[in-house]
Each structure stands twice: as structure tokens, then as C-alpha cells.
Amino acid sequence: MQQLGYLKETPSQTAGPYVHIGLTPNFCDILGVYDTDLGIAMVNDKTLGERITVTGRIFDGAGALVRDAVIEIWQADSAGLYN
């Protein structure tokens, strides 16, 4: 048996292999679910606060790159409040 103890497991919630379809049905040509896909316009010219870019890579427990992952993040608005 191969030892895979070099990467620790993290808490996860499995959404299945179709998570991108559920979040962006219009992009996947599944029309009528949402008027616009969720998160398509998170900021505009009226949005206050500093812009940041978050980058990274997601690996599975065996160290292989995960190409279809969703990361949920929360950040307070420019006044330090959560909507």
C-alpha cells in the first residue's frame, strides 16, 4: 500500500463533478436558472475599497493538481462589515 501521509487532509464538502455547471449555468448553455451567473460581477466602478488578487493552486491528497475546484472566501466590505 502506498503511503500518502505527506499531505494532510483538509475539511471538505463534495459537490460532485458538476459544480461549475451549478454555479455558471448560463456559461454552460443551461438557460433559465439565473438571469446572470452567480459572481459574474463582484465589483464595479462604484465599489469602495482596495482591490486584491488571490492566487494559488489546489492539490488533492495524493499531490495531484485539482483543475475543477471551488474555493469559498469571505471578506468584509470597505467599512469592515459583512453583507
Image (spheres, rainbow, N blue to C red):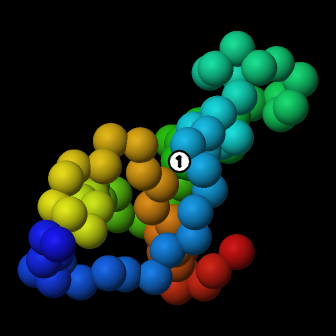
Q: How many marks?
A: 1
Residue at the spot 70% in from the left edge and 75% down from the top edge: 83
Q: Describe the element under mark 1 as helix, strand or loop.
A: loop
- Name the outermost residue toward the right: 32
Q: Do we see residue 59 in this rendering?
A: yes
* Amino acid type, label 1: Val
Q: Nearer the viewer, residue 44 or 20?
A: 20
Q: Could you say which is closer to the camera, residue 19 or residue 42?
A: 19
Residue 73 versus residue 30 in the image, above or below: below
Please say whether residue 46 is visible from this viewpoint.
no
* Rendering quarter of residue 31: top right
Residue 80 is left or right of residue 54, and the answer is right
Give the quadrant of the N terminus: bottom left
Mark 1 surroundings: few (<14), some (14-19) or many (≥20) residues within 10 A: few
22 to 11, vertically: above or below:
above
- In the visual, does 17 lie left or right of 5? right
Is 37 positioned to the left or the right of 52 in the image? right
Name the residue: 28% across, 61% down.
60
Residue 4 place in picture, x, y as percent: 16, 75
Residue at 60 percent across and 50 percent down: it is 16
Looking at the picture, how far across and down is residue 3, in whole percent?
Answer: 13, 77
Residue for badge 1 = 43
Horizontal and vertical percent position of residue 6: 10, 80
Furthest residue in direction front, as rendered: 1
Q: Quadrant of residue 7?
A: bottom left
**Residue 66 at x, y = what percent?**
30, 49
Q: Is residue 52 left or right of residue 82?
A: left
